[in-house]
């Protein structure tokens, strides 16, 4: 009873814990799949994969079933404070948490019984809409920095549209719906959410730790990269990939500009901040890779494979997640927000995994399948170390005796 009362005491607790467990299961499953596809051991025949490509399943579960839990937990905890609210009432997040968790359990069961996929996605979508509705209510309250919560709410609604599209694919099998759904989840939901949160929090955290640091948060930069994310997704869906560079190259310049302006030499000695700054550096690099692939498309279509996507998802999303979620978990447990060896080790293992995953898709790289498998194993090891260290803070009461 005490465990349940504590886990459901605040939105970040239930959401983060669900995200951690889901991440470990997803990556363990995917490493096994990669090993089988590489011939290291015998494959397992999953009935669901006769109806959809495994890579579509992986993309959907990672975006909507792993990273979304962390994004929801963060924004439902931090967002109300940006708007001047107190602690969020439980009816804003508890039903959504239960629906999301129950839905993903059914999606897992659908690997054996594919008929459960539709029911599982419907439950997930219902929980997702509950989160979107809660954020919309919060965003209506006037506040000095209302743009951040409003943009976050819009991104969650875009993610709901993406999930609905993938649900449509599960019902009638139209591959265009699956492509639209995965695209919206990445370019309409996840990247806009991460960019919005980074623009709001990275200069703020840096200024909090270093007196004299001047926060740089130009609205034009945030609006520009958000427009680039949506435009990239649309062009990609329309299969106009030779023209993606028109969007990706300017976006890369803006992101690299922000990386340079936000950097502070003293950050190198503060690990908790260094993680966030290094993670964001991957974003500009990812868009340079997207732009390069687009420019070469006429001669060598898809020459970089999924390297740009994984520079974005493993390099930026995963590393930023470790830094942000560590801060929130420690701070809301009543503990000092200081880095430890576990977080630092997990971060660098993730960096190594991201580098290997990007390298595995580059031309003329030998033993690409082995690099791919090693990348997945490193990511799983990193997340395991981090989860073992930080998950207990989510089911233990705050050490300062405060609620939440």
Image (cartoon, rainbow, N blue to C red):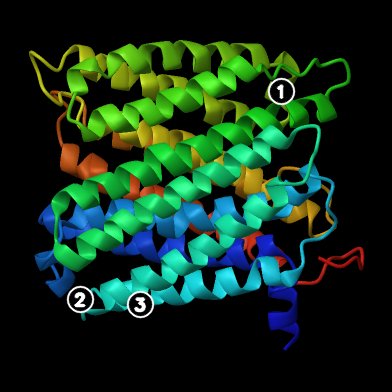
The residue under the point 33% across, 72% down is 107
Residue 114's tag is 2
Measured in 3D between alpha carbons, the distance from the residue under mark 3 to the one under mark 1, in whole angstroms, is 44 Å
Measured in 3D between alpha carbons, the distance from the residue under mark 2 to the one under mark 1, in whole angstroms, is 49 Å
Question: Horizontal and vertical percent for residue 135?
Answer: 64, 53
Q: Are marks 3 and 1 in contact (CB under 8 Å)?
A: no
Where does the N terminus fall, quadrant-wise? bottom right
Q: Nearer the N terminus, badge 2 or badge 1? A: 2
Regarding residue 32, the answer to whether it shows in the image is no
Measured in 3D between alpha carbons, the distance from the residue under mark 2 to the one under mark 3, in whole angstroms, is 10 Å
Q: Is residue 67 left or right of residue 354?
A: right
Q: Is residue 131 left or right of residue 335?
A: left
**Which residue is at the front of the view, 164 or 384?**
164
Q: Are marks 2 and 1 in contact (CB under 8 Å)?
A: no
Name the residue beneath numbered marker 1. Answer: 267
Q: Nearer the N terminus, badge 2 or badge 3? A: 3
* Number of numbered callouts drawn: 3
Q: Is the residue marked by circle 3 packed among few (<14), some (14-19), or many (20+) residues within 10 Å? A: many
Residue 203's tag is none
Regarding residue 146, the answer to whether it shows in the image is yes
Q: Is the residue marked by circle 1 packed among few (<14), some (14-19), or many (20+) residues within 10 Å? A: some
Please, is residue 219 above or below residue 29 in the view? above
Name the residue beneath numbered marker 3. Answer: 106
Query: In the figure, residue 147 lies in which quadrant?
Result: top right
- Outermost residue, bottom side: 1
């Amino acid at each position: 009873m005490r465990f349940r009362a504590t886990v459901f005491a605040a939105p970040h607790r239930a959401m983060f814990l669900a995200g951690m467990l889901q991440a470990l299961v997803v990556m363990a499953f995917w490493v096994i799949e990669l090993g089988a596809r590489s011939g290291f051991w015998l494959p397992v025949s999953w009935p669901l994969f006769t109806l959809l490509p495994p890579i579509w399943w992986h993309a959907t579960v990672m975006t909507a079933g792993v990273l979304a839990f962390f994004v929801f937990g963060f924004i439902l905890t931090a967002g109300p404070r940006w708007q001047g609210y107190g602690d969020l009432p439980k009816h804003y997040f508890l039903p959504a948490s239960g629906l999301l968790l129950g839905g993903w359990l059914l999606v897992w069961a659908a690997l054996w019984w594919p008929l459960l996929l539709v029911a599982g996605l419907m439950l997930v979508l219902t929980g997702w809409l509950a989160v979107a509705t809660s954020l919309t209510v919060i965003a209506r309250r006037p506040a000095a920095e209302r743009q951040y919560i409003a943009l976050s709410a819009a991104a969650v609604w875009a993610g709901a549209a993406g999930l609905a599209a993938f649900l449509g694919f599960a019902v009638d099998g139209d591959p265009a719906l699956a492509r639209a759904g995965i695209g919206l989840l990445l370019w309409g939901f996840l990247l806009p959410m991460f960019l919005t949160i980074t623009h709001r929090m990275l200069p703020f955290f840096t200024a909090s730790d270093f007196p004299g640091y001047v926060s740089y948060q130009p609205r034009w930069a945030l609006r520009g990269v958000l427009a680039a994310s949506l435009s990239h997704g649309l062009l990609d869906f329309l299969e106009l990939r030779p023209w993606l560079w028109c969007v990706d190259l300017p976006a890369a310049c803006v992101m690299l500009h922000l990386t340079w302006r936000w950097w502070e030499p003293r950050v190198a000695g503060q690990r908790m901040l260094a993680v966030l700054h290094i993670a964001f550096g991957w974003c500009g690099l990812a868009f340079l890779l997207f732009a390069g692939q687009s420019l070469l498309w006429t001669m060598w279509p898809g020459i970089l494979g999924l390297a740009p996507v994984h520079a974005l998802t493993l390099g930026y999303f995963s590393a930023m997640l470790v830094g942000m979620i560590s801060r929130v978990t420690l701070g809301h447990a009543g503990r000092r927000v200081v880095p430890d060896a576990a977080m630092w080790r997990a971060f660098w293992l993730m960096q190594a995994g991201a580098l290997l995953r990007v390298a595995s898709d580059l031309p003329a790289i030998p033993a690409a399948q082995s690099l791919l498998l090693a990348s997945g194993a490193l990511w799983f090891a990193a997340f395991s170390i981090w989860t073992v260290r930080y998950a207990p803070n989510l089911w233990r009461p705050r050490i300062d005796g405060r609620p939440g």
